[in-house]
Image: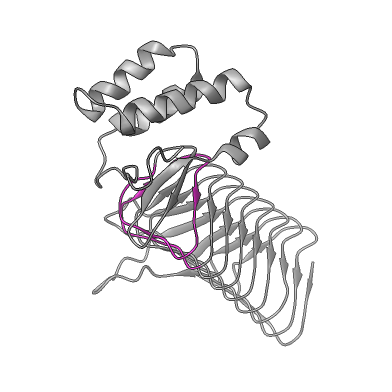
Amino acid sequence: MTAHPSSVVEDGAVLGAGVEIGPFCHVGARVVLGEGVRLRSHVSVTGITHVGARCDLYPGVALGGEGQIRGNDFTGGRLEIGSDCVLREMVSMHVGSQKGGGVTRVGVSGYFMANSHVGHDCRVGEGVTFANSVALGGHVQIGDGVIFGGLAAVQQFCRVGKGAMVGGLTGVNRDVIPYAMAFGDHVELAGLNLIGLKRRGLSRDTINAMRATYRSVFTGAGGSLADRACAARAQFPDIAEVGEIVEFILADAKQELCLARRRGGDPI
């Protein structure tokens, strides 16, 4: 472990083997830095924060601050960041709140570009990509492999499903199903994330089943949206990704579901 003499590491902090702490950093007493974590410079890690092995924290990163809640006096909140994450300049992530269960969790291998923010009590999956200035409000759930374009913002309690892609400057105020593409000032579905599905190595038959599910659920007629989702699951019982989409739709959620745009015909 190496630490620049200008940095402050409080008594009680736990530093793994090979940790590098650059100039003008602050590491709090209740912080755990995993093996090989690098704090480049001017990084603040406070609160009850656990940073996983080999994470790379660029200048201005601020981790472990209290949730941005009026009158918040909860001192037991935690922030847990998985291994091999890259946090670029000025990224901020807050600990959990008492109301939200007390923990903010970020999965492994995330890439967070400059000025992105993860609010209190969020659950962020593995392998996500946040472009510059993406912001998550409190209690947001983000699935594995989600990609956000720059300046996208997600409202409190919203969910974005696994493998979805959210365009830049998009305001997400409703739940986005897994594997979708979503865009707009107020988010609308624009079809499936076909490039992402191909990169995942999914077969043509699987992708075609997912496209058929999307069409029948979001642009079909007859019955409720939930009825059409159940019918799709019955039609493709052996396609796991169809099951994921249907379970997401049927879940007991706090926000409304993001629907497909109707302009210009079939969004697929």
Asked if residue 27 can be seen in this view, the reply is no
- The reply, left or right, for residue 151 in relation to residue 6 is left
Specify the principal SS of the magenta part. Answer: loop
Q: Position of residue 241 (x, y in %)?
A: 49, 25
- The colour scheme applied to this rendered structure is one colour
Residue lying furthest left: 223
231 vs 60, nearest the viewer: 231
Range shown magenta: 151-176
Instruction: Give the number of callouts.
Output: 0
Residue 77 occupies quadrant: bottom left
Residue at 57 percent of width and 37 percent of height: 194
Seen in the picture, residue 43 relative to 117 is either above or below; the reply is: below
Residue lying furthest front: 264
248 vs 2, nearest the viewer: 248
Residue 239 inside the magenta-drawn segment: no
Seen in the picture, residue 192 relative to 34 is either above or below; the reply is: above
- The reply, left or right, for residue 130 in relation to residue 23 is left
Q: Position of residue 206 (x, y in %)?
A: 56, 21
Residue at 60 percent of width and 50 percent of height: 82
Seen in the picture, residue 13 relative to 183 is either above or below; the reply is: below
Q: Quadrant of the N terminus?
A: bottom right
Residue at 62 percent of width and 22 percent of height: 204
Asked if residue 137 can be seen in this view, the reply is yes
Q: Position of residue 14 (x, y in %)?
A: 64, 62
Residue 245 occupies quadrant: top left
- The reply, left or right, for residue 112 in relation to residue 225 is right
- The reply, left or right, for residue 239 in relation to residue 228 is right
Q: Position of residue 3 (x, y in %)?
A: 76, 76
Residue lying furthest bottom: 6
